[in-house]
Image (cartoon, rainbow, N blue to C red):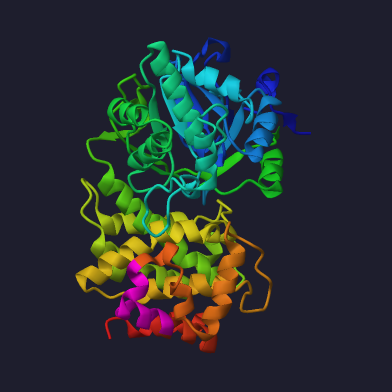
Amino acid sequence: MATRLSLSTLGQLGPSVGIPGYRRDELSPGIVHIGVGNFHRAHQAAYLDELFERGLDHDWAIIGTGVRESDAEMGRDLAAQDFLTTVVTQEAERSQARVAGAMISFVPPGDTAAIIARLVDPRTRIVSLTVTEGGYYIDPATQAFDPGHPDIAADAADRLAVPKTAFGLIAAGLLRRRAAGLPPFTVMSCDNLPGNGHVTADAVAGLVDLIDRDDASWIRDSVAFPNGMVDRITPATSERERQSLRDDFGIADSRPVFCEDFRQWVLEDHFPAGRPRLEDVGVQFVADVAPFELMKIRILNGGHAAIAYPAGLLDIHFVHEAMQDTQIARFLSALLDDEVIPVVPPVPDTDLAGYKRTIERRFANPKIGDTIRRLCLDGSNRQPKFILPTLRDALQAGRPIGGLALVSALWCRYCYGETESRQTIEPNDPSWARLTEQARLARGTPEAWLAMHDIYGELDQDEHFRRAFSETLRRLWQSGTRASLDHYLTSRGA
């Protein structure tokens, strides 16, 4: 029988399971983190757990919180196991399990007073967040903060009395610290966004600008928002993973995290209120994160999009299965070589061709169990960040765009809501109804898809792209996904 995870049962776990060698009751909080989902617990929290294991920086433990009901459910489940998480790292030939204990408490969403009290606590020196790419209230067309979003407008109208958004909570905490004469905490985004520190600053100060411009100016001038690049493939947890943990390691954990062994975190070293010594556990501190994040977003995240939609249309379930499909794997390789990597600027001490090979190996890892559906999720937010900027740069440079146009057409075809075997694709985007309507219009008139100006912006006016997209989408409908992939692969350089 599997052992239910808790502090009291750590000694009952098998010798193959790593457990904290540090005392949890000797940790004190230094970080409040908003959004304690799988990626956070496999990445930031795992780095801190390793640091604590080395006997370092025990005053930087995490207090978790969130703004969604799913965060509340997560908090309840974690509280039942003393905020411990089993992190299972997997490669093709091995799996390792470690119980991580960097989080020591959780404040439920909706308990605004308690959350703000944590933010104002002088011990809180960093507030970090993982709220997904779609959680920053960015206009997809302009890629700028949208102050007119109803959530932001509601927090502004309430003058941050009871903020409902992550940025409203952060702003309220900062302004109360200012009023109390306390130094501001550092705000650290851990999401996959170009210039995620700048984006977060725009969201926090942009919200406050709607209330008081002096306070907004103080935030821009006085608060640190370091940019960072984060990377670790971390699929959603299902009953499959929970059962695997019970069978392979004898642990009953309601919220385990399964992830690849690879991890990377590149940060600007801009933490006026102090920070843990994360460089001791492999975090890279650099003067400029931009080259690293552009590489990752365009090659890894863009690569995910490239394999996701053809695989989704062909009823392929897992990412590693897509990489076992020779045609899809060849498409990914050709697209990265011909259209993506040529418009990725040089990255310090990094060979982009070697990085590409690492990405392909990681995607092919059969142990991860990452799903194609997860990669297809939220394309209306991800395409403008992961694919369309590369497309713009390629157009400007006069480079080929056939593969990028095919990725966009495959996304459109996916949003039609039906695979090639006529299986229904369940809603997989916050704007699914709208996307499905546009995709059905585009079946007869491809340009209708590009008319979504909030996503494509000025690209719908580029004749080269319009023609490539329209021809590709028509081919998809006439001949299917495999014929369209084959056409691209055989016409490269033509």
Q: Is residue 426 above or below residue 177?
A: below
Residue 8 x %, y %: 70, 17
The picture places residue 447, in percent across and down from the top left corner, at 44, 79
Position of the N terminus, as image quadrant, is top right
* Outermost bottom residue: 478
Tell me which residue sits at (48%, 26%) in the image.
Answer: 172
Query: Is residue 249 among what the camera can see?
Result: no
Report x, y in % for residue 325. 51, 71
Relative to the observer, which residue lies in front, 254 or 444?
444
Q: Is residue 468 magenta?
A: yes
Q: Residue at x 45, y 14 (%)?
A: 123
The residue that appears at 37% across and 68% down in the rendered structure is 333
From this view, report whether residue 135 is shown above or below residue 26. below
Quarter the C terminus occupies: bottom left
Dominant secondary structure (helix, strand or loop) of the stretch shown in magenta: helix
- Is residue 31 something that shows in the picture? yes
Q: Is residue 401 above or below residue 205?
A: below
User: Which image quadrant is residue 469 in?
Assistant: bottom left
Nearer to us in this view, 346 or 273: 273
Which residues, given as a range, are shown in magenta?
A: 458-470
Q: Identify the residue at horizontal 41%, vertical 35% (top origin).
A: 204
Up the image or down, 187 lies above or below 140; here it is above
Left or right for 171, reference 257? left
- Which one is in front, 98 or 473? 473
Q: How many marks?
A: 0
Residue 492 % position (x, y): 31, 81
As drawn, is 417 to the left or to the right of 288? right
**Is 173 covered by the magenta stretch?**
no
